[in-house]
Amino acid sequence: SQQPGFIKLKSTCPIVATWDDHDYGKDDSGADFEMREESQQVFLDFLGVAKDDPRRTQEGIYWSKVYGPEGKRVQVILLDARYFRSPVKKGFDGREPGDGYRGRYSPNTDDDATVLGEPQWKWLEEQLRVPAEVRVIGSSYQVLSNQHGWEMWGNFPKERERLFKVLRDSEAGGIVMISGDRHLAEMAELKANDSSGIGYPLYEVTSSSLNAPSGNMTKSGVRFANEINPYRVGLTFFDTNYGNILIDWTAEQPVIRLQVCDEKGGVVLQQRALLSDLQP
């Protein structure tokens, strides 16, 4: 919290956050982390969350808020994909590292396996009924990409399908997703006509990392990742990056720009969408 850049950021704008594994506790950990209750309070202390905030007494740090006036409301929904999450299943499911399946996990299809836990699922359904024009849903790890074998919603395919169904059944418009974790950046799209889609294009921007880019290097020093993402749009960016969402409310049809930017602020990846196209 004493890092100069963080202090400057904190003085410039409000900071809201969810956690990933190294904020939460052990590497790739979930509900099995024995210090999760203590970790929750330390994390909220770091963010400066008030002592009477609901996150101080609920299990998990999921959170939501609506910003802006009617007609220009942006709802930010931050999911907690750690506190309740069932154990990941180790193994390569018949595939070998190096053939596009480099990670250490395979799908957990147990009926009781969960990512969000029932209290948070109920809360999410309630949040999707709150009036808003744009909804930014944050997951600490990727939702769409489902074949790289590292941490992802794809490790829990039934929960991933449940998420798409909850979004679809809510008939909420303007949903976009953000995620991190991967030490790389990319954009993905679940097309409107996909059998598990939500009724309109669902875009996800993965931005990571601010301080620890991908360690995958060729002999010539070029970063790479030999992994399959059937939902990827465009290229993968491997250097230090951050995500940016711009909304132009002045246009006749409001425009959303989802961006990945490099260290100097240059846009290296962008997805542009009309808000009118992100409707059920």
Image: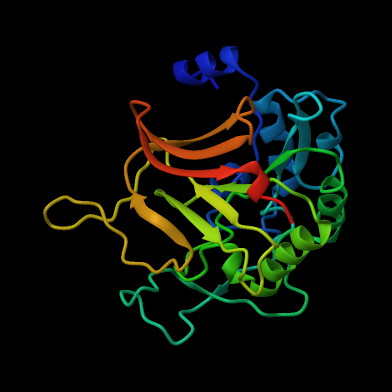
Observer-nearest of 229 and 115 = 229
Q: Is residue 15 above or below residue 179?
A: above
Return the x and y of residue 53 as percentages of the image width and height: 84, 29
Residue at 47% across, 39% down: 259
Return the x and y of residue 20 as percentages of the image width and height: 58, 47
Observer-nearest of 168 and 184 = 168
Q: Is residue 273 above or below residue 114?
A: above
Q: Is residue 154 above or below residue 134?
A: below
Q: Residue 102 appears in which quarter of the rendering?
A: bottom left
User: Would residue 144 appear left or right of 183 to someone viewing this image?
Assistant: right
Query: What is the image's colouring?
Result: rainbow
Quarter of the image for the C terminus: give it: bottom right
User: How many badges with numbers are in the image?
Assistant: 0
Q: Is residue 190 visible?
A: yes
In the displayed orientation, state which residue is furthest to the left: 220
In the displayed orientation, state which residue is furthest to the front: 252
User: Would residue 1 appear left or right of 242 to someone viewing this image?
Assistant: right
Quarter of the image for the N terminus: give it: top right
Residue at 58% across, 69% down: 154
Q: Is residue 175 visible?
A: no
Return the x and y of residue 188 as percentages of the image width and height: 50, 56
Observer-nearest of 4 and 269 = 269
Observer-nearest of 168 and 51 = 168
Q: Is residue 99 above or below residue 52?
A: below
Return the x and y of residue 212 as percentages of the image width and height: 37, 41
Q: Residue 44 appears in which quarter of the rendering?
A: top right
